[in-house]
Amino acid sequence: MQIRLWKDCTNGCTFCSLKNRETTKLEDKITRIKTIKDFHDTKIGLIGGEFFEGQLRGCEEEWLSMIASLRCDFLFISANLIQTPYLLNETLSVRPDILICTSYDTSGRFHKDGQKEAWLKRVKELRHVFCTIIPTQDMLTDSFIDQIPCGINLCEPHLGVDWYKNVNKQHYHETLIKENNIFNLPKRNDLLKWMCKHPNVLQMIKNYKVTHFNDIYGFDSNNHIVSEVLHRFEDNNFRAKCGHQYFSRCYADSDKCFACDMEEI
């Protein structure tokens, strides 16, 4: 399971569907942390928002206690690593095998000179880390990506969880093309050529279910845990006839499935 504890984040990525949300109160954060403290599953991912920009000030004790108590074989935590992280080292001291999931994007993520380089330095300092990138046309000519030392996984662009859940899947691609004003979507042939030059990325996509979660949960305004997405690997509202997620139809110039193309390669 993947759990979205809150949506607070100060980075303001231009493409983020969660930006400009209300700040979660400290008492609500503490309630949510305590709610998941005894959760157990084979694989648990904690996502935001963000955790290590200062969002954990005032609830450090509860957070570290929760990290120690979660029962799972694999624990993933998302972190943008753009600012100097607060409480990340302490978190890793409690559980050194945590896999930090960070992100890189050519456009829209880094807003100031030096941020990319500082981010890369922090990535290199971590023992267990992997990186997600949204495939765009801009990404395909970005040589900075070749400096990233960890595993890279591509996360196909769509227009947000709520949009994805509600869009008419029979017209998925044409609706994406019509309504998208966020991403410079990749051209099919260009992205396939890039993939052939990056076999390490191809290998990560091959292990799709290892790097993605079947169930995603969040919290409502009353701090009750609610499902955002359930059984997406099996649910036909998310899975196209080819067996892959509809969001794999992400090319600018073709309605073909990116995941099908990757399998063929």
Image (tube, helix red, strand yellow):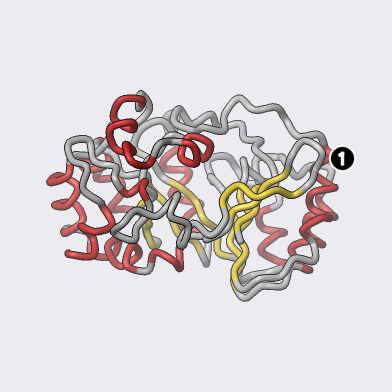
Task: Identify the residue shown where x is 37% and y is 42%.
Answer: 169
Q: Tell me residue 200's x, y (percent).
A: 28, 65
Query: Which of these two is toward me, 101 or 163?
Result: 163
| Label 1 environment density (alpha carbons within 10 Å; few <14, some 14–19, many ≥20) | few
Q: Is residue 207 left or right of residue 87?
A: left
Task: Identify the residue shown where x is 18% and y is 64%.
Answer: 264
Task: Identify the residue shown where x is 61% and y is 50%.
Answer: 47
SS label for mark 1? helix
Q: Tell me residue 199's x, y (percent).
A: 23, 64
Identify whether 113 is placed above or below 237: above
Query: Which of these two is toward me, 171 or 136?
Result: 171
Q: Is residue 139 left or right of residue 187?
A: right
Identify whether 165 is placed above or below 174: below
Query: Which of these two is toward me, 221 or 87?
Result: 221
Query: What type is the residue that disc 1 sits on?
Result: Glu
Q: Tell me residue 6's x, y (percent).
A: 69, 41
Q: Which residue is mark 1?
A: 27
Query: Which of these two is toward me, 55 or 222?
Result: 222
For the C terminus, give its image quadrant: bottom left
